[in-house]
Amino acid sequence: MKKYQIKRRIKIALDTLRVNDNYLLKNDVSERSIAHRLALYLENTFGKEFNVDCEYNKDIEQVSGGKKIMILEDIWRECHRSINSNEDIIEDADILIEKSVIPDIIVHKRGRNDKNLIAIEIKKSSSRVNENYDFEKLKAYTSIENNLHYEYGIFIKFYVNQNRYMEPKIIYFQKGKQID
């Protein structure tokens, strides 16, 4: 599927969320609730060709069954400093560590890794968690080195507690890099 087709379908799902579920954004309801509603609308836009799942934690190529990524330890620690601000960054920047991950929403074909179309990470503007970790996960989901085979990664930041609806911030990833 081409990028413009995906962008169009994402926009339709986001517009539907805005019309039907703006209450969730205005009232700063949990990220999982927002992800669930968005996944329902994505399911409508992607039709029968793909499955849309929230918090899907399986990878058929892993013995353990769970999704794992390799990430540089210093990047992982830097992304988590906002939570544990007293931790120091390690000196050796070449240490790769394996981390279990669960994307917020995925568009894929269940039981196959050759049809992993999109991994989506969602963040609310009220979150205290650094969004850089989401960026690193999306790079890893789309990188050939991590073998998760997602064609695209999408970061969506929802602005909550606003009197007026604000368009979400959307960033796309492909082949381990941020794209336009």
Image: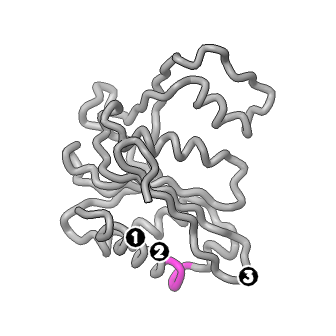
- Residue 131 horizontal/vertical position (percent): 61, 48
- Residue at 31% from the left image edge and 74% from the top image edge: 45
- Residue 113 horizontal/vertical position (percent): 22, 43
Question: In the image shown, does 119 or 100 lie closer to the viewer?
Answer: 119
Question: Cα distance, mark 2 to mark 3?
Answer: 18 Å
Asked if marks 1 and 2 touch (Cβ < 8 Å), the reply is yes
Whether residue 134 sits left or right of residue 80 in the image: it is left
- Residue at 29% from the left image edge and 54% from the top image edge: 117
Tell me if residue 18 is in the magenta stretch. yes
Tag 1: amino acid:
Ile
Whether residue 16 sits left or right of residue 88 in the image: it is left
- Residue at 20% from the left image edge and 68% from the top image edge: 48
Number of other residues with Cα within 10 Å of mark 3, as a class: few under 14, some 14 to 19, many 20 or more: few
Question: In the image shown, does 24 or 155 lie closer to the viewer?
Answer: 155
Whether residue 35 sits left or right of residue 146 in the image: it is right
Q: For numbered disc 1, what is the local secondary structure?
A: helix
Question: Cα distance, mark 3 to mark 1?
Answer: 23 Å
- Residue 170 horizontal/vertical position (percent): 51, 63
Tag 2: amino acid:
Leu
Tell me if residue 73 is in the magenta stretch. no
- Residue at 45% from the left image edge and 68% from the top image edge: 38
Number of other residues with Cα within 10 Å of mark 2, as a class: few under 14, some 14 to 19, many 20 or more: many
The stretch in magenta equals: 17-21
Label drawn at residue 10:
1
The residue pinned by badge 3 equals 163
Tag 3: amino acid:
Asn
In the image, residue 172 sits, relative to residue 72, either above or below, namely below
In the image, residue 16 sits, relative to residue 89, either above or below, namely below
Q: Main secondary structure of the magenta part?
A: helix
The residue pinned by badge 2 equals 14
